[in-house]
Structure formats: C-alpha cells, structure tokens
C-alpha cells in the first residue's frame, strides 16, 4: 500500500500526469525522492488518504502498471495511466477483448445488432469493452451480460470508478460489477467533465484486441476512439448503415476509405455457436494465402485470382487478418 500511496500523492498533484511522472522518475530515481522535491502539505496528503480509505470501503482496488494484473492492452500504449482503479472482477482485465463503440442516439435496429454481436463475442469467451454511455455502449454491455459468466464486460468511465454516469445506467453499472469490471484512471469520487471523455476513449481503444464501430457521425467521440485504435495498430471493423442517416456517415466513410473492414454479422468472426475461438480452419495452403506475398494485392485482383467475388472473400480476409496471417498495406494485402 505504501507504493500505491506514494504514487497517488505524485499523480494527484496538479499538473502531474503520466508524462510528467516519467520525467520526474527519471530525474529523481524513486517515488520517495520525487515526493521530497514536491514538499506537499499535510492537507493534501490527508486528501489522498481519504480517497484511499473511500476506495477500500467500496471494494475498489488500485493497480499499478508494474502489476501483472494491469491490462496488457493499456501497458503497450505510450503514456498509459500509471495507476488505474478497478471495481469488480479484476480477472476480466486480461482476457481477450473487443471494444464496441457508437452513438448515444442509436436506432433500435442498431442497438439490436450491437447487442446480438456482443452476445456472440461473450459466448466465444471475449470480454466486451465500452464506455457505459447510453445508446450503443449500453447495447454492447447488455448484450454481453445476456451470456452467463463472471468476466463478460468492461466499462471504462470518464469520472471516478464509483461515479455512475449517466444515472440512467445505474442498474447496468451494478450488473457490470457482478459480471465484469468498471475501471478509471480518475480519482475515486471524481465527477466526469467533458475533457475526460477523450482520455476515456483512448483506453477503450487500447484495452481490446480490435474495435467495432456501429452508428456514429463524423465528429463523434466514437470516431475519435477509432483514430486512437488505428494509432495503436488495432484492426477496426465498421457496421454499415443507410447513406441518408447521419449516424451512418462515420462507419460508411471508414469502410469506403478502407480504414475499416465491413462488419455484417457475427459470422464475420465466428463459424457458429459451438466454435470457441476465431476461425482457425485457414492454413497457408488455402487459395487466398497461396496468392499473397510481399507485394500488396488488392481485393478485386485477389478475388479474380481465386475466382470468387469481392464480397465472397471479404470474410476470409477478416479472419486471416485476425489470425495475424496477413495485413493491409498500400491498399492491398500482403503475408505477415
């Protein structure tokens, strides 16, 4: 607890975040030496102690980035949180995971699609990660929670891990505590403010193996999450929508520009309900892999080579990318 306390004292000091903390650690060599240089007041130290006491009484746990329980997805991101607070089942944090994001103002059809997709991922032992907002996030969490298990979903909050927002999702919050985990980098008791949601989106993107975006307009937070995911080298999938619906502009643009793979149904990821992992039936002897090398081959050329339509090979390409056998490069595909 001393290590947590010292790190929190530093990180709760105004104007000290992960970047500044790293600079101070390099300069002074240890947390205790940093604290000596800061000369914090007794009142400030007491405020951190009160936060820790509140966390303890609520069953909230702090996890440092040198702890084996710290999420691997976050650990690989530059300037990740030094400490996160977790409420719920900590074992949820290091399971294979998919992030699902989209607008708060989703259509009924969009929410049903996301809910069904989330259930399919939960059935195949994936944790579904989202931000617990209304609309798409809610559908993602509730879809995962339809499947039995204790590590089904992660909610990343922009406020303290104990601060329920939006209030309409209070019952969902407590169900997530029982069937997954709620995490945050913000101090316990913190009310979310607008600027915190961007950081929240960074961690939603970073936690998972890949990301799926449903309905979202071009200027939405969900599109920001997509940009973070792309920066982290994550594969992005997009659910298409009607061209006249503003909520479809984001995912439709990503598909058209080649920045995201078309997502039509759970069969894009899984063979059937009995399959317990991503499709593994493809080997280096299959037709597609035989036609790829170090020079990028476009979808249309590849389809012609294997004598299939572009629509027929899209799902094959998705699976092979997820398996790490191929990757996109310069508008085409190459072998990894």
Image: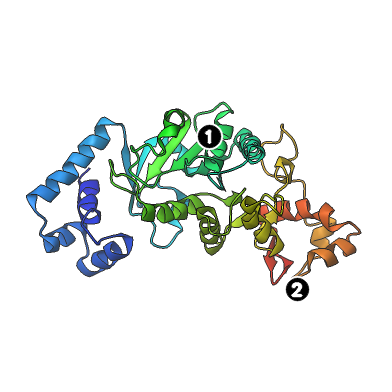
| Residue at 68 percent of width and 56 percent of height | 252
Residue depicted at x 78% and y 69%: 297
**Residue 281: % across, % down:** 77, 46
Name the residue beneath numbered marker 2: 295
Considering only vertical position in the picture, is 210 above or below 148? below
Q: Which residue is mark 1?
A: 152
Whether tag 2 and tag 1 are in contact, CB under 8 A, the answer is no
**Mark sitting earlier along the chain (2/1):** 1
Q: Is residue 323 visible from the viewing direction of this image?
A: no
Task: Give the CA distance from mark 2 to mark 1.
Answer: 40 Å
**Count of marks, rendered view:** 2
Which of the colour schemes (rainbow, by chain, secondary structure, one colour) is used? rainbow
Q: Is residue 268 left or right of residue 200?
A: right
Tell me if residue 26 comes above or below residue 247 in the rendering: below
Residue at the far top in the pictured view: 148
Q: Nearer the viewer, residue 120 or 111?
A: 111
Between residues 259 and 313, which one lies in front from this camera angle? 259
- Mark 2 residue element: loop
Position of residue 92 measured from the top left corner of the image (x, y, whole percent) = 47, 38
């Amino acid at each position: 607890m001393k290590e947590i306390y010292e790190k929190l004292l530093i990180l709760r000091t105004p104007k000290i975040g992960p970047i500044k903390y790293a600079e101070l650690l390099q300069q002074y060599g240890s947390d205790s030496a940093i604290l000596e240089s800061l000369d914090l007041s007794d009142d400030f130290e007491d405020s951190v102690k009160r936060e820790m006491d509140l966390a303890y009484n609520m069953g909230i746990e702090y996890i440092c980035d040198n702890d084996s329980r710290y999420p691997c997805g976050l650990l690989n991101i530059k300037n990740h949180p030094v400490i996160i607070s977790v409420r719920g089942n900590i074992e949820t944090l290091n399971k294979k995971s998919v992030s699902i994001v989209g607008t708060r103002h989703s259509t009924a059809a969009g929410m049903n699609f996301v809910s069904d997709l989330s259930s399919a991922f939960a059935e195949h032992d994936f944790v579904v990660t989202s931000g617990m907002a209304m609309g798409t996030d809610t559908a993602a969490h509730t879809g995962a929670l339809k499947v039995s298990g204790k590590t089904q979903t992660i909610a990343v909050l922009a406020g303290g891990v104990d601060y329920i927002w939006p209030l309409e999702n209070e019952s969902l919050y407590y169900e997530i505590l029982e069937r997954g985990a709620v995490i945050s980098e913000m101090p316990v008791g913190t009310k979310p403010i607008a600027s915190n949601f961007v950081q929240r989106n960074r961690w939603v993107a970073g936690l998972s193996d890949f990301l799926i975006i449903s309905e979202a307009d071009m200027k939405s937070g969900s599109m920001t999450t997509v940009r973070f995911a792309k920066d982290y080298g994550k594969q992005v999938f997009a659910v298409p929508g009607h061209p006249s619906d503003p909520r479809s502009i984001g995912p439709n643009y990503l598909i058209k520009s080649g920045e995201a793979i078309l997502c039509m149904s759970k069969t894009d990821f899984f063979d059937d309900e009995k399959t317990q992992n991503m499709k593994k039936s493809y080997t280096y002897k299959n037709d597609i892999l035989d036609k790829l090398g170090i020079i990028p081959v476009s979808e249309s050329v590849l389809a012609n080579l294997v004598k299939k339509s572009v629509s027929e090979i899209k799902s094959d390409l998705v699976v092979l990318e997820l398996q790490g056998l191929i990757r996109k490069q310069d508008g085409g595909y190459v072998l990894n």
